[in-house]
Image (cartoon, helix red, strand yellow):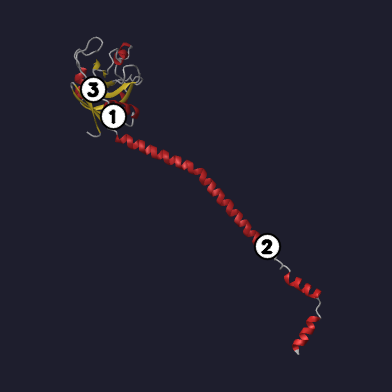
Amino acid sequence: MLNSSKLHFMARITPQALLNQSKRKKGPARISATTVFFCNLVVVVIVLSVVATYKHWSQRSRNQPISGLSTFEDTANSFADSKKYDLPGYAILNTSKGYITVELYKDGSPMIVDKFLDLCQKEYFKGMPFHHVIKHYVIQAGHGQGLGAAEDWTTKGKLHSRLATSPKHEAFMIGTSKTRDNTGFELFITTAPIPDLNDKLLVFGRAIKGEDVVQEIEEVDTDEHYRPKSPVGIIGVALKHEI
């Protein structure tokens, strides 16, 4: 009985009414203003995060080469320092009058010391004569046969009275001439404080033993050009890290 009434009611509903009812059910739900605000806020936060991340990595990529260069320079400096301290610090000159022990100034004159050590390893000083000896001034060794630098200084009036002196040019200092000519690397050992050699001599060491040997060489007989009448020279050079 109920089913018959229900069917009769549904038959009275027109198709247009059903269509309107279906549209009302499927209509979009209204979005509140609060929901829209929070959605926009989330978008803004995401955008700001992306921008901040980009700036961070961009700055890091720019700084990385500088940091790498600094690390390379530190490593190079450390290597140079370790190399410097691995070099021998002493040279023992075996002369025809005895031994002269020289302390090398690796910190004060690194380039000259490097050159000296290289020549020692090549036996450059083996058989080198002291070809000019000037008492109370300097003794000079080298392979040159012409006018010695020490004699040249004296002929130009460089042999002055010993007054105020630089500690760099006290007695028993070891150096080489600043003037580069065809005579090669020559050795000078001062036998007295020389205040006027700052523009001539590159000091790279000092005799700490064998000063008496230097004085004995200084006392040999020479001619009028300060050349020894009897041969005196360097037999060889031994390099030492410690003495």
Residue 214: image location, x then y, percent: 21, 22
Residue 96: image location, x then y, percent: 18, 21
Q: What crowding class fits label 1: few (fewer than 14 Cα within 10 Å), some (14-19), or many (20 or more)?
A: many
Residue 120: image location, x then y, percent: 27, 26
Residue 197: image location, x then y, percent: 33, 19
Q: Amino acid at mark 2?
A: Val
Label for residue 104? Answer: 1
Mark-to-mark CA distance, 2 and 1: 82 Å
Q: Residue furthest top?
A: 224
> From the viewer's perspective, is 212 left or right of 74?
left
Residue beneath the point at 73% across and 70% down: 26
Mark sitting earlier along the chain (2/1) = 2
Total marks placed: 3
Mark sitting earlier along the chain (2/3) = 2
Q: What crowding class fits label 2: few (fewer than 14 Cα within 10 Å), some (14-19), or many (20 or more)?
A: few
Q: Amino acid at mark 3?
A: Lys
**Residue placed under numbered mark 2 in the picture:** 36
Residue beneath the point at 60% across and 56% down: 46
Which element carries disc 3, helix, strand or loop?
loop
Label for residue 126? Answer: 3
